[in-house]
DNA sequence: TTGTACGCGTTATCAG
DNA sequence: CTGATAACGCGTACAA
């Protein structure tokens, strides 16, 4: 590679001191207009590009954030994460931040390994996506201030981490209300992975809302599994085997819903006539299948954006105490329910 | 943050010289077993983590690659890119490479801007995803050796860039043959974005194969658009307006196919009875919709992996001349055709 | 095998 | 406003 041109070269060609050249390039206001123009011209002529590695070392900062995606190296990455990632990249770019992506399979996430990226100056901050657990003790901020780590799609404020999440409960309340409004009185709940944050919260939201409506006796939890299509398909089998089939199915997420619909329809049931189906997430393609899926659309990309903004605020020292931002989903009523 | 511990600290605690400590950590074989253990112990005790920024500067390398995703900041990111990204992260991790992700909206891609990431030592190499154009002249390797840039999902060997692609032609040949084998004699082709690499190649493949079969007169190209669901839906309208509707529709990609199916079915047509539909890509959810989509499944993740391997080989000097790797898709025959 | 000394390219401090 | 100089922390010829 070329990359010979350094500040020293510019200093030589301009006859200025290397420090002046550096200043002219990074704090244009701190030098005379004349010097500035000169430096800029010579820099352009010589094709100066700088050396990020050197800058990082000298400044002690990288202007880079890392996003940690779970199960990325698995069967299929959730389209939801993709959306979040989109928002992350978008916002990061407009804030002048670079983004590094790192996948991890472990749940709970290896906290120490994550902190290492901060300590060894690989990145300035980290965005956790849908991370189940965070141990503030092993992270080393048991009683000290929180590190530049933000949790997205999972409320980790209890561990001292600022978080941005969707109001999942609201989403499921809307789903339940919609279904109840349609006259349904029996509800299957197609579960996600047992014990997992999202699964627990969503089921609780459904159960509580049904209880509030006096409909709790109509709730039939059905084992689902990982948040994917195949699990939904498998759940359909369990649903079909029921003696008394509920007239509505509330799925923990869209992928489960799609798989579920496929399963019941293959068995000859009609959606929504025999069983109404609703999901959660709002994946784009749910609007383009037949029947189009009724689902609570969460602002995934916006969640990513908000996470990056929060991280940036944190890095710039604009916020210091853990904060929680939660964004509202909206119900998209379509054909399936 | 803590991060005080440096090699100098270890040197002090062990009584060894800083360079010995450095060696013990990076070339364990070049020091005595005793020193090595001592250093490792002290390093562990003090919680030494190193400083990546310093290492990068000193070594002149970052052990990081950048993947450039197009249109990432747009409507919806293609699930195909997500798959590729998955493979990239997977392989990069096993090769000890970090990955940075950067989106760009411009087509053609701003070659100079990309080269800058290399010259300023932000990353060691770059993976271009589905990049339409690359100008070797502005990239600065008109007649010199190629830079550490690999193109994925788009053959750019003509511009001197090693590339890894899917055998799209084979995929569409398989689709055409399958449809013809089913007895179809008239074929709608739902196009992608006009002029774009994939669109051009795929249409040509369909047309050529149909011609080879003597069926070229049955080909009816229909305007589609961007590779998304909405474009497919819109294309369905044009298809429906045809005087003589073909009995089969070959779509430039799965998203177009899904949207198209949705459109024709809403109009009361049956798939595959009134019109058989086939796609290309093999998105996972195409198997879980009704009717399940017949499509050519390309090994997207593997393409990402191969791209990273190739880039790594390039960086390690194992390969130097531009190379082309192309992976075969396989036809998944399902319900839609 | 270990130590010395310098280079990597920038930024920042502190005079001038 | 500009210049000299000292970090930044690590890698590595070269010498011992």
Image (cartoon, coloured by chain):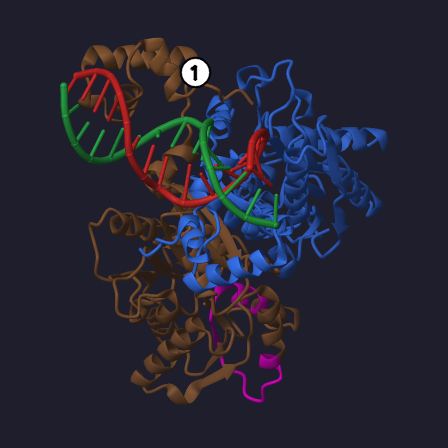
Chain colours: A brown, B blue, C green, D red
Q: Residue at x 69, y 53 (%)?
A: B336
Residue A248 inside the magenta-drawn segment: yes
Q: Position of residue A211 (x, y in %)?
A: 33, 85
Q: Position of residue B146 (x, y in %)?
A: 63, 23
> Is B224 on the left or on the right of A146, as rendered?
right
- Picture quadrant of residue A231: bottom right
Q: Position of residue A12 (x, y in %)?
A: 36, 12
Residue A183 inside the magenta-drawn segment: no
Asked whether the viewer can see residue B247, the reply is: yes
* Total number of numbered discs in the rendering: 1
Between residues B23 and B171, which one lies in front from this camera angle? B23
Asked whether the viewer can see residue B230, the reply is: no
> Is B66 on the left or on the right of A124, as rendered?
right
Q: Residue at x 65, y 73 (%)?
A: A267
Q: Badge 1, how many Cα within 10 Å: few under 14, some, many 20+? A: few
Note whether A90 is above or below B6 in the view shown.
Answer: above
- Picture quadrant of residue C16: top left
Between residues A23 and B147, which one lies in front from this camera angle? A23
Note whether A104 is above or below A238 in the view shown.
Answer: above
Q: Quadrant of the N terminus of chain B?
A: bottom left
Q: Residue at x 31, y 66 (%)?
A: A141
**Element at label 1:** loop
Q: Position of residue A174 (x, y in %)?
A: 34, 69
Report the magenta residues as a range.
A238-260
Which residue corresponds to mark 1? Answer: A47
- Picture quadrant of residue B176: top right
**What's the chain of the residue with tag 1?**
A
């Amino acid at each position: 590679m070329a990359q010979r041109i350094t500040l020293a070269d510019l200093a030589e060609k301009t006859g200025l001191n290397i420090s002046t050249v550096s200043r002219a390039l990074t704090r244009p206001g701190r030098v005379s207009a004349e010097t500035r123009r000169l430096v800029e011209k010579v820099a352009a002529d010589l094709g100066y590009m700088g050396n990020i590695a050197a800058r990082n070392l000298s400044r002690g900062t990288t202007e880079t954030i890392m996003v940690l995606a779970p199960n990325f190296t698995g069967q299929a990455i959730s389209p939801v994460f993709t959306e979040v990632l989109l928002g992350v990249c978008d916002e990061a770019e407009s804030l002048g931040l670079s983004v590094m992506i790192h996948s991890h399979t472990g749940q709970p996430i290896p906290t120490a390994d994550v902190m290492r990226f901060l300590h060894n100056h690989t990145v300035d901050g980290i965005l956790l996506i849908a991370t189940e657990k965070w141990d503030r003790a092993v992270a080393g901020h048991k009683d000290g201030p929180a590190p530049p780590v933000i949790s997205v799609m999972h409320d980790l404020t209890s561990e001292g981490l600022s978080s941005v999440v969707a109001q999942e409960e609201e989403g499921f309340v809307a789903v339940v209300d919609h279904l109840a409004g349609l006259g349904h009185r029996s509800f299957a709940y197609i579960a996600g992975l047992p014990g997992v944050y999202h699964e627990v919260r969503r089921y609780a939201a459904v159960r509580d809302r049904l209880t509030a409506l006096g409909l709790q006796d109509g709730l039939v939890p059905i084992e689902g599994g990982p948040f994917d299509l195949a699990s939904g398909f498998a759940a359909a089998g369990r649903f079909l085997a029921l003696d008394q089939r509920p007239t509505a199915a509330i799925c923990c997420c869209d992928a489960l819903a799609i798989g579920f619909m496929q399963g019941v329809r293959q068995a000859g049931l009609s959606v929504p006539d025999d069983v109404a189906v609703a999901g959660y997430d709002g994946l784009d393609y749910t609007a383009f299948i037949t029947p189009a899926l009724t689902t609570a659309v969460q602002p995934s990309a916006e969640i990513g954006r908000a996470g990056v903004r929060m991280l940036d605020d944190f890095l710039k020292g604009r916020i210091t105490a853990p904060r929680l931002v939660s964004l509202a989903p909206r119900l998209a009523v379509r054909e399936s329910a």
